Image (spheres, rainbow, N blue to C red):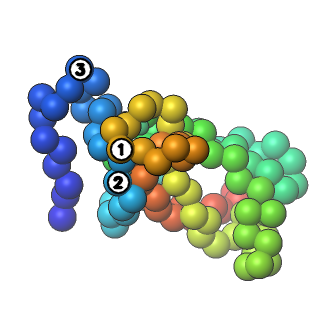
Amino acid sequence: MTATAPGGAGPGGRSAVPYHETTEDDYAATYTARLDITHVNEETAVLSGACPRCGCACAYVHTRRTFRGARRRLGDGEIPVHCTCATGHPGRPEGEAGCGAYWNVRLERR
Ligand SMILES: [Zn+2]
Ligand SMILES: [Zn+2]
């Protein structure tokens, strides 16, 4: 299943996909294929990649505090990531970032 944005809708080209909160099964695989993870310290990691939906570069700062309630440790399990690009996607609510795409990334320490 793929979502295809209508072409020729604006000067921004394919990066100007409208804001839409959505996820697809292949987002995680597409994202992690080009992902660069920097462990800042024991509790913080920076995920640098490109959004699988809009294609914009986006960095996601992950900390243990992100899932205070889940009490999972960094390096184990899946973490929720959402697009954080600064591109002005049409229809984006004020105060939000990204294009609305979200997905889960499995962090594994090597
Ligand atoms: Zn974007
Ligand atoms: Zn995006």
* Nearer to me, 80 or 42: 80
Q: Which mark is residue 20?
A: 2
Across and down, in percent, residue 6 comes to: 13, 41
Quadrant in which the C terminus appears: bottom right
Label whose residue precedes the other's in the sequence (2 or 1): 2
Determine which quarter of the picture holds residue 95.
top right
Which dot, 3 or 1, sits closer to the camera? 1
Quadrant in which the N terminus appears: bottom left
Q: Amino acid at mark 1?
A: Gly
* Relative horizontal placement of residue 86, taking residue 39 as reference (left or right): left
Label whose residue precedes the other's in the sequence (2 or 3): 3
For image coordinates 30% across by 43% down, the residue present is: 18
What whole-number distance in Å separates the C-alpha atoms at marks 3 and 1? 16 Å
Query: Label 2 neighbourhood size at 10 Å, few (<14), some (14-19), many (20+)?
Result: some
Label whose residue precedes the other's in the sequence (3 or 1): 3
Q: Describe the element under mark 2 as helix, strand or loop.
A: loop
Which dot, 2 or 1, sits closer to the camera? 1
